[in-house]
Amino acid sequence: MSEHNTNDHKNHDHGYGHYILIWFALLILTGLTVAVAGIDFGNLTIITALAIASLKSFLVLKVFMHLEVEKRVFTVFVYTSLFFLTVSLILLFSDYSFLQG
């Protein structure tokens, strides 16, 4: 008989209610993104929209893509790529704001 380690998926089985709650949160954040797009915050409009998009992507990664139960190496790769994406966006917007000023 083969040994099957069931401890890897222990306490990671969420019910439908958990997914529906996250889905509603994503819907609310999408509505907030649309509302922010219609309001002129000046330079903060893009930063606010990117912050909301980052929160939505975090929820999708952690819950729907089950990143919380993946192996540590995979999680490190995802967070490293997100870090370099953030650095690239910061450099892009700082360069763009320097050219505008």
Image: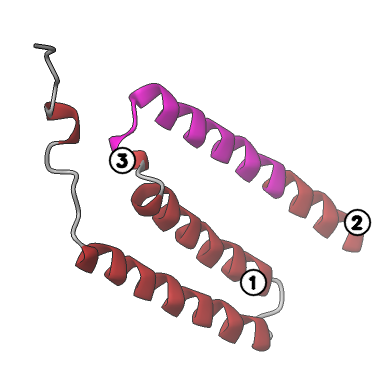
Q: Label 1, on which residue?
A: 44
Residue type for callout 1:
Leu
- The residue at the point 40 percent across, 57 percent down is 59
Image vertical order of residue 81 relative to residue 92, above or below: above
Q: Nearer the viewer, residue 100 or 80?
A: 80
Q: Say which residue label 3 marks.
A: 68
State the colouring used for the structure image.
secondary structure
**Sequence-earlier tag: 1 or 3:** 1
Left or right? Give the position of 1 relative to 46: left
Q: Which residue extends farthest left?
A: 1
Q: Is 12 on the left-hand or right-hand side of 38?
A: left
**Which secondary structure, mark 3?**
helix
Residue 5 seen in render: yes
Instruction: Give whichever of discs 2 and 3 has the lower sequence position.
Output: 3
Per the image, the residue denoted by label 2 is 99
Q: Tag 1, which secondary structure?
A: helix
Residue 44 coordinates in the image, percent (x, y) = 64, 72
